[in-house]
Amino acid sequence: MTFHLIRLAKPDDGAAVAEIYRPAVVERATSFEINPPDAEAMATRIESCLVRFPWLVAEEDGEVTGYAYASAHRTRPAYQWSVDVSAYVSNRAHRRAIGRSLYEALFRVLALQGFRNAYAGITMPNEASEGFHRALGFTPVGIYRGVGYKLGRWHDVLWLERALVPLDDTPPVPTIDLALLARSPLLDAAIAGKPTPRFRLATDGDVPAVRRLIDTSVRGLSEPLYSGQQIDSALRYLFGPDSRLIADGTYYLAEVDGEVIAAGGWSRRQTLHGGDQFKHGDDPLIDPDREPARLRAFFVDPRWARRGIGGLMFHICSTAARAAGFSALELTATLPGEQLYATLGFAVVERGSVSMPDGVTLETALMRRSLTATPSESR
């Protein structure tokens, strides 16, 4: 079998993609379009799609032999975690598992972005396409009877569905636009079938895993900026899970194969830093019209550092904070985290320190940024 490369599409692929698509428009009712798009029109579609959704192509010896892409399932906000998917393979390249490879890569990218469900429509009858989709885990939803008229007859369309992640009742996290994900090495990893994280809300049951993550992250990433004594003291008195963030539904995890490898959140409360062991008394809500939201408790496993996870976590947090009415974010940065936050558009407001009960101090920086700016969020 000839090796085929799966990669992100480019507008320059417009001519090859248009040629693959043309028979579905001109010769069959596979597509309900009547006039086939030319190379320029297809290039525009690819470019437009890649702002939010993945469009992948298969390539053999430099020739594009198939493509698959996702689009919005519906426009109303509650549908935003569901997508429609389509795949087309060149007539010269059938029965080479190209369609399967494209779809499997597409599903991995969509899951990484935070989408939960995929839907596909098939003009009937088409036993080959129906069997292909069923083999990839799709199940029938229903049939639109006589929904389209083309080539002199009315056509039924079978709709199928497939879960992209295990179904549960937990609230979803904000999705990650493809244009943002494309700046992270995680996109290529997902396309290639390498492990990538799933972002989700933290629950009370995650506290032990978060505690282990914090210990691993602080010990693995704080030297040489902090001494061993500072690290030990901070882990005892300062860094730890914040149960209020979890209860408020504003703390997120990145998980790979059931292991928590990163965490981070935002808060609508007064506290700027510290786990449960550091806080005392009430933690009142703040007014989004007068104060910035807090960015809180970002930690990453050293094995997953510098892969763009922190930037994607920041995107999720800032999107949620913006939706809650906040126009700015503020945080207390440790010295190891200051560089990351600077790349995310934060500026130092003032420098200070946090004192622990044992007399050890930790140098920190108060940082702030507007939520109206859009610097790179995935470095």
Image (cartoon, rainbow, N blue to C red):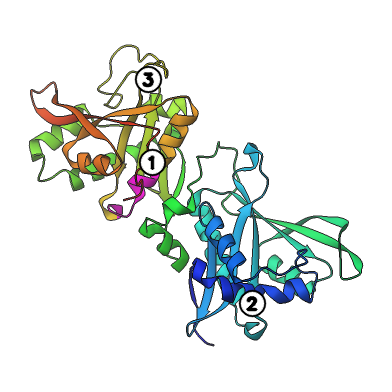
Q: CA distance from mark 1 to mark 3?
A: 24 Å
Q: Residue at x 43, y 59 (%)?
A: 187
Q: Which of the labelled discs sits on residue 269, or is there none?
A: 3
- Left or right, residue 294 beside residue 48: left
Mark 2 burial class by Cα count in 10 Å: few <14, some 14-19, many 20+: some
Q: Is residue 16 visible?
A: yes
Name of the residue lying farthest toward the right: 153
Label 1 sits on residue: 374
Residue 80 in the image, given as x and y percentages of width and height:
60, 43
Q: Position of residue 78 (x, y in %)?
A: 64, 37
Range covered by the magenta-colored residues: 304-313
Q: Give the CA distance from mark 1 to mark 2.
A: 37 Å
Determine which residue is flagged by label 2: 19
**Nearest the eye: 307 or 258:** 307
Say which of 71 and 132 sits in front.
Answer: 71
Residue at 19 percent of width and 48 percent of height: 220
Q: Secondary structure at mark 1?
A: loop
Magenta region includes residue 278: no
Q: Is residue 362 left or right of residue 289?
A: left
Q: In the rendered structure, which disc, 1 or 3, sits on the residue that comes first in sequence?
A: 3
